[in-house]
């Protein structure tokens, strides 16, 4: 399938607390999940995004992000920004919570503005200013200005990305200072 989402703005609350009927939980300020071959361009999230997945069931891990919760093969995000507060227990990012794709999965020229990113899982929350967790993909020319914090005191936090398994990072900058 192919979707093209352009110039969307969210100013509302997006909240999803896991329900046992869901296969996975993907929560985003603009779109929950970008499957194969989707594009998001020039979108902005100002809204608060709150999500909670199931730590005990890895097959149900989704992501929570300011633009999209999760993205997959050949999906792309261009020139999009988050200014909202993002809070979830795991795989939390200012732009994308979780990426599992290929080298053609792209996040380019994106900004996590003043939006705070908060994780509440006490073991490996995978919390990042731009990307919470990435398995492949390319993250290029992105900037983080937002704060990061972990409620339970876990240590897996990265101002651009926390957990990386093969993603390519190029020309990304963190401007936030504690």
Image (cartoon, rainbow, N blue to C red):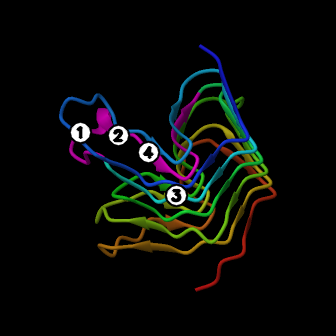
Task: Name the element at disc 4.
Answer: loop
Image-based side of 50 in relation to 116, left or right: left
CB under 8 Å between discs 4 and 1: no
Q: Residues within 10 Å of mark 4 (few under 14, many from 20)?
A: many
Image-based side of 52 in relation to 3, left or right: left
The residue segment tinted magenta is 53-72
**Residue 69 among magenta residues:** yes
Task: Name the element at disc 1.
Answer: loop
Cα separation between marks 4 and 1? 13 Å
Q: Earlier in the sequence, mark 4 or mark 3?
A: 3
Looking at the picture, how far across and down is residue 12, in whole percent? 49, 54
Mark number for residue 47? Answer: 3
Q: Earlier in the sequence, mark 3 or mark 2?
A: 3
Which is more toward the observer, 104 or 51? 51
- The residue labelled by disc 2 is 61
Q: Nearer the viewer, mark 4 or mark 3?
A: 3
Q: Residue at x 64, y 29 (%)?
A: 102
Looking at the picture, how far across and down is residue 16, in whole percent? 33, 46
């Amino acid at each position: 399938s192919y979707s093209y989402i352009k110039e969307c703005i969210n100013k509302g609350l997006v909240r999803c607390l896991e329900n046992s009927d869901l296969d996975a939980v993907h929560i985003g300020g603009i779109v929950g999940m970008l499957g194969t071959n989707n594009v998001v361009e020039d979108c902005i999230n100002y809204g608060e995004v709150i999500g909670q997945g199931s730590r005990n069931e890895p097959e149900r891990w989704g992501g929570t992000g300011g633009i999209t919760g999760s993205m997959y093969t050949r999906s792309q995000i261009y020139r999009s920004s988050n200014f909202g507060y993002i809070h979830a227990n795991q795989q939390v990012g200012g732009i994308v919570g979780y990426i599992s794709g290929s080298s053609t999965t792209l996040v380019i020229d994106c900004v996590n503005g003043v939006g705070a990113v908060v994780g509440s899982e006490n073991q490996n929350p995978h919390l990042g200013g731009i990307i919470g967790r990435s398995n492949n993909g390319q993250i290029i020319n992105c900037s983080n200005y937002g704060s990061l914090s972990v409620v339970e005191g876990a240590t897996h936090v990265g101002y651009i990305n926390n957990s990386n398994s093969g993603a390519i990072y190029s020309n990304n900058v963190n401007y936030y200072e504690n």
